[in-house]
Image (cartoon, rainbow, N blue to C red):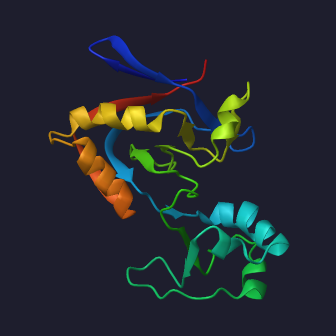
Amino acid sequence: KMRFYQNGKQIFESDVVVGRIDRPTPIFDSKMTYMFLNPTWTIPDNLVRRDLIPMLKKNPEYLSEHNIHVYTSYKPGAQEVEPDFEKLFGYEHDDRPIPYRFVQFPSENNALGKVKFMFPNKYSVYLHDTDNKKLFGYRYRVFSSGCMRIEKPFEFMHLLFNFTGENYTEEKIRSIFASNQPTTIRLKKQIPVHIVYF
């Protein structure tokens, strides 16, 4: 469960999907500082090795089917390229940095859904929407690679708008989502986050 408290009173609750047994969500404390609407997802090297490369071996069209773009590096302005699969596959069981950056653009099928909630931490873990809603129907919801997927992301998003110090009307929110452009919304008040297991 994900629970939100204000002045000692619980005002929000949602089911979540957490990390798999072999990729557990870590226990830590942090502070939520911003939301990201229409997020992109930069696929970490460890997931490129574990998940993306095996998928590309089965389906070479996976990148285009899932709106994933490939760049030569992590540097700003890096060139978009067609990856050399033979070269890429050699990194599946290798600890060297992957020679490409894989970025899934905003869409209904983005793995992060339409919004993510950021609380900086050394694990690169965060809370986010998901394109795979059926996972919330399972009794044991341990399917992610460490991040937490929230069942009610938009209810939580609307709640957090109260902490931005700005007026976000329904029209303005719809306009942001309709633009499909990544949009950062900072919180005026940082919110303590505690990840624990019961």
**Does residue 66 lie above or below 133 as drawn?**
below
* Residue 55 sits above or below residue 82 on the image: above
Identity of the residue furthest to the right in this view:
58
Instruction: Give the camera-side residue of 129 and 174.
Output: 174
Horizontal relation, residue 158 to residue 55: left or right = left
- Answer yes or no: is residue 198 visible: yes
| Quarter where residue 69 is shown | bottom right
**187 sits to left or right of 36:** left
Residue occupying the point 37% across, 58% down: 178
Quarter of the picture holding the C terminus: top right
Question: Could you tell me which residue is drawn at 16 percent across and 41 percent down?
Answer: 167
Looking at the picture, how far across and down is residue 126, in whole percent?
Answer: 48, 44
Query: Quarter-wise, where is residue 154 in the image?
Result: top left
Looking at the image, which is closer to me, 44 or 128? 128
Name the residue: 51% across, 86% down: 80
On screen, 115 above or below 69? above
Q: Position of residue 160 (x, y in %)?
A: 30, 34
- Left or right: 188 in relation to 193: left
